[in-house]
Amino acid sequence: MSNFKYRKRIADDLLDLQLESAGAVLVEGPKWCGKTTTAEQKAGSVLYLDDPENIEQNLMLAETRPKAILEGKTPRLIDEWELAPKLWDTARFEVDHRHEMGQFIFTGSAVPADINKIIHTGTGRFSWLLMRPMSLWESEESTGEVSLRSLFEGDNDIFGQNDRKLEDIAYLICRGGWPGSINLKKMPSLTIATNYFEAVVRRDISRVDGVSRDEQRARRLMRSYARNQGSQAPFNTIADDISTNEIEKLSSASVADYVEALKKIFVIEDMKAWNPNLRSKTAIRSSDTRYFVDPSIAAAALELGPDSLINDLKTMGLLFETMAVRDLRVYADALSGNVYHYRDKNNLECDAVVSLRGGRYALIEIKLGGERLIEEGVKTLKQLESKIDTDKMNKPSFLMVLTATGQYAFRRPDGVFVVPIGCLKD
């Protein structure tokens, strides 16, 4: 008998809202992140397009009688809809004629290969929901004593106790937020991320659009991307990095092609630059910052385990930043917000800017921990805060140093919050 227990996701409430405000909802995200399981909690009926016993029949029916596939108790869940992109326009037509919200949930782990089969954009009929691997709050590995929402609402009286040690964080980085790994023992749980990486380089990167891509080049590219987490490394730098042992140098265009394929299967999620109003005319660098959707992908690409990270704190710092960005993105979604990165021509850099509608935003530096690194983070935050032209935009709602370790979450006398990631929630 299965001991499966559904863990509440932040996406649950977001999906409820979307079903109340749109005729159909598209839930996208990487494989194994829990899209189907979350959608099943809301569905009145389900069709798994990729069910091995029925896939050929399902795809034939989707091509010849797509309306029949959409018949069923609502919300009707169509899993891996990208296998039959014709269903998109059929669902749009049905939404138009049923005149009811919450008719369909489509889930997908890739952008459809044959996008030309879709005629209508879905505007006004579809809404979109992006799911990622679990945050520490969702996997019940954060106490949640500090709420991002409460901080934006002006709650300055925070306190939390953190029991996550550096060794715990190293393990959580390598395990990642894959729901299937949460309840497993240590070694099997670490294997989930390795298996995910292998599936990407062996099959998924080519299957996404039917373009054959070299497995070894995919491995080297993902390894280089892992080394460049949190940076704005251009494609020519990545091309040089992975061409070291190749007779024929890989071009920037080839790197862009591989990266685009990885984005289509939601493995890579780069971060856009933040462009505030500043008092001085400082040129802001607008390049995207490189990130995988989950830190475990980077660890698997680099063939690193928890012990390896403990022995290489510089690399651990880069991968911890990826985990912190993952969690901040999940929490920001709950607030209808986005996460950006700031860097100017003088190399003043802020790891994360959580921006909400209405002009509210927070500046966040991400550090492994320790007094010296926290002080560096505080200095950066104060510098950036002083540059912002508060005559033209709001002042920051708060400043935070988000750490891997540290016993307490608290507010410093200078007003900066110091919060271990094991105390944070949406």
Image (cartoon, helix red, strand yellow):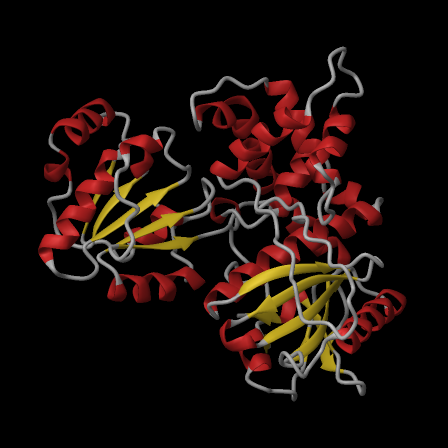
Relative depth, front residue between 189 and 111: 111
The outermost residue toward the front is 281
The outermost residue toward the top is 247
Q: Residue at x 57, y 26 (%)?
A: 201
Q: Residue at x 45, y 40 (%)?
A: 31
Residue 281 drawn above or below residue 114: below
Q: How many marks?
A: 0
Residue 406 appears in the rendering: yes
In which quadrant will I find the N terminus?
top left
Q: Residue at x 75, y 72 (%)?
A: 407
Residue 84 drawn above or below residue 269: above
Residue 47 appears in the rendering: no
Q: Residue at x 57, y 46 (%)?
A: 269
Which percent across, then down, holds residue 111?
A: 40, 37
Residue 12 drawn above or below residue 111: below
Asked where in the image residue 79 lies, by quadrant, the reply is top left
Which percent across, then down, holds residue 396?
A: 66, 78
Q: Quick check: 323 left or right of 183? A: right
Which percent across, then down, holds residue 284?
A: 73, 59
Asked where in the image residue 375 lies, by quadrant, the reply is bottom right
The outermost residue toward the right is 372
Q: Quick check: 426 left or right of 251? A: left
Which percent across, then down, holds residue 14?
A: 38, 64
Relative depth, front residue between 179 and 315: 315
